[in-house]
Image: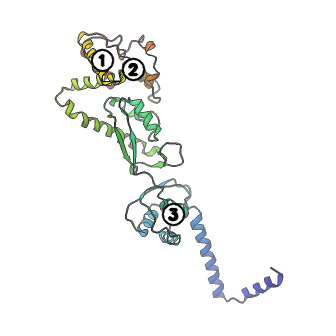
Amino acid sequence: MDKFKIKERILHFRDLNKTQITALTIAVICVLALIFAVWLPIRLDQGQITVRISRGLSLSQISSELRDSGVIRNKYLFMVYAAALGEDKNLKAGNYVFKDRASLTEVLTKLSKGLSLPEDITTFIPEGYNIWEIDERLAELGFIQKSEFAETYASNEGQLFPDTYKINADNAIFVEDNKATISSGIIDSLKREAVIKTIGSKMIENYNKQTEELLKNLTLDKKKEIVIIASMLEKEVRSEKDMAIVAGIIYKRLKMGMPLQIDATVSYGACLRNFKATGDKINCDVSQITVGKEIRIDSEYNTYTSKGDRYQILELNQLKQL
């Protein structure tokens, strides 16, 4: 552009009246404000915000929900922006987590692509899992930090029914961009305690429901005995045929006052001892216990040395938890 054209444009700008200049200035400011609103963060360092967008909500209702939750400042600006990009009909229901410094673009992208938390988070607890194995499973899935579940439910060993369990995402706050196996992240520490309680109570409730008919006509002592012996068999043998044989041996030895000589109780006792020694903070793997060494240590769980009548072993408070 030569000097003559530049001078001509300057003279043309001088010919504009005050009203035109004011209108032009306002237009420039509005454009800049829109750019800032769309691309720059909405808030600074206020932590994550979790928002529930229900099915069937209109664009106006969704915008109001986002504004009321602190995700956006101006619902009308969000509505105009969504409509301008043709996404006003594509916003999806779900539980959403918005990180610090989210922009309108980031918010709209997440809603239009349905990048929400899962409605239900599912975990499977296999048969035969002890308290530490359940704890490890939940930690691997990102529900808890290791040992938190074991510490809370150590006294309920044997009453945590193996099954598939679901937890609604509404019950948890999630931290994104973590290495947990759940795609949306791991549960924040503020909600872990509630989630632990939810899973544990569901497992105990399921146990009571599943065993109600089976144990309904038995005394409390007999119920405890069956659960303990079943736990021993679960770890000691694999096939149902072998379980029937070993169960017969156990009852015969109890009747005769003989040591039961069950490796599973020895391993469990060693693990529990180690767990308590760490202040309930480090889980134990019973498969890593050297039974040959442990049977030389006299303890309430050492069924190679403990003997007596039926309840001298089964009624030990700690063994109730096996």
Q: Position of residue 54 (x, y in %)?
A: 38, 60
Q: Earlier in the sequence, mark 3 or mark 1?
A: 3
Left or right: 59 with respect to 81? left
In the rendered structure, find residue 246 and report the number of the disc placed on it: 1
Label 3 and label 1: CA atoms lie apart by: 62 Å
Which element is circle 1 on? helix
Q: Amino acid at mark 1?
A: Val
Which element is circle 3 on? helix
Camera-nearest label, 2 or 1: 1
The residue that disc 2 covers is 269
Left or right: 265 with respect to 312? right
Q: Amino acid at mark 3?
A: Leu
Label 2 and label 1: CA atoms lie apart by: 20 Å
The residue that disc 3 covers is 108
Q: Earlier in the sequence, mark 2 or mark 1?
A: 1
In the rendered structure, find residue 289 and report the number of the disc placed on it: none
Camera-nearest label, 3 or 2: 3
Left or right: 41 with respect to 58? right
111 to 162, vertically: above or below:
below
Q: What residue occupies the far left of the structure in this picture?
A: 217
> What's the residue at 43%, 66% (across, down)?
64
Camera-nearest label, 3 or 1: 1
